[in-house]
Amino acid sequence: MKQHTVTDSPYGPLTLVADDGVLCGLYMAGQRHRPPQESFGPRDDSLFGEAEEQLGAYFAGELTRFRLELRLDGTPFQRSVWAGLRRIPYGETRTYGELAAELGAPNASRAVGLANGRNPIGIIVPCHRVIGAGGGLTGYGGGLDRKRRLLDLENGTPVSALF
């Protein structure tokens, strides 16, 4: 059974979704590929304390690695991409091509990009750490401005300076 909550963040409201108590979604307002609200189940603010606490610590620059149980539903290839995202260290980036090569599919940078865009647990599964081949910011379901601010946060810019 799915349940959800909405929590405030420096990046706008975040909708957290759990399935049988396991986090399976984190969506930003206006996010591309955001499932319909009715698919999130009833609101229950009591289930998400640990996730909200870790997100707060991340936004404060005090947490560099999330330690939450996650349920990432997708194709085997998508799940491999999302696992690869979780291996990118805090404050670092990879290009789509580099991530594809790390996954053993060096010619699959476009497929990596498509899987990256379908990441159901943004921020925690750090799809914002993937950049274009030339080092520029490309595609981000939450918007390029949020992507830039998340990368700046991870590179030591205080949240208060990002807004």
Image: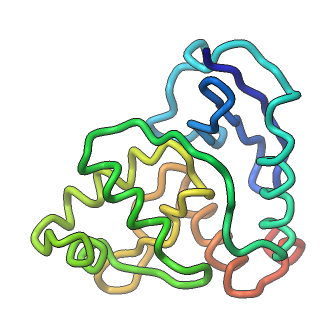
Which of these two is toward me, 138 or 89? 89
Above-or-below relation of 6 to 126: above
Above-or-below relation of 51 to 163: above
Residue located at (50% from left, 72% from top):
129
Q: Quadrant of residue 157?
A: bottom right
Residue located at (62% from left, 57% from top):
124
What number of labels is visible? 0
Residue at the extreme left: 107
Q: Is residue 118 left or right of residue 3?
A: left
Residue located at (63% from left, 38% from top):
23
Look at the image and tell me in which quarter the C terminus lies. bottom right
Residue 59 pos. (x, y %): 81, 66
Look at the image and tell me in which quarter the N terminus lies. top right
Q: Is residue 86 left or right of residue 146?
A: left
Above-or-below relation of 10 to 60: above
Residue located at (78% from left, 67% from top):
58
Which of these two is toward me, 89 or 20? 20
Residue 40 pos. (x, y %): 61, 20
* Colour scheme of the rendered structure: rainbow
Q: Quadrant of residue 153?
A: bottom right
Q: Is residue 67 left or right of residue 134?
A: right
Q: Is residue 114 left or right of residue 71?
A: left
Residue 63 pos. (x, y %): 78, 72
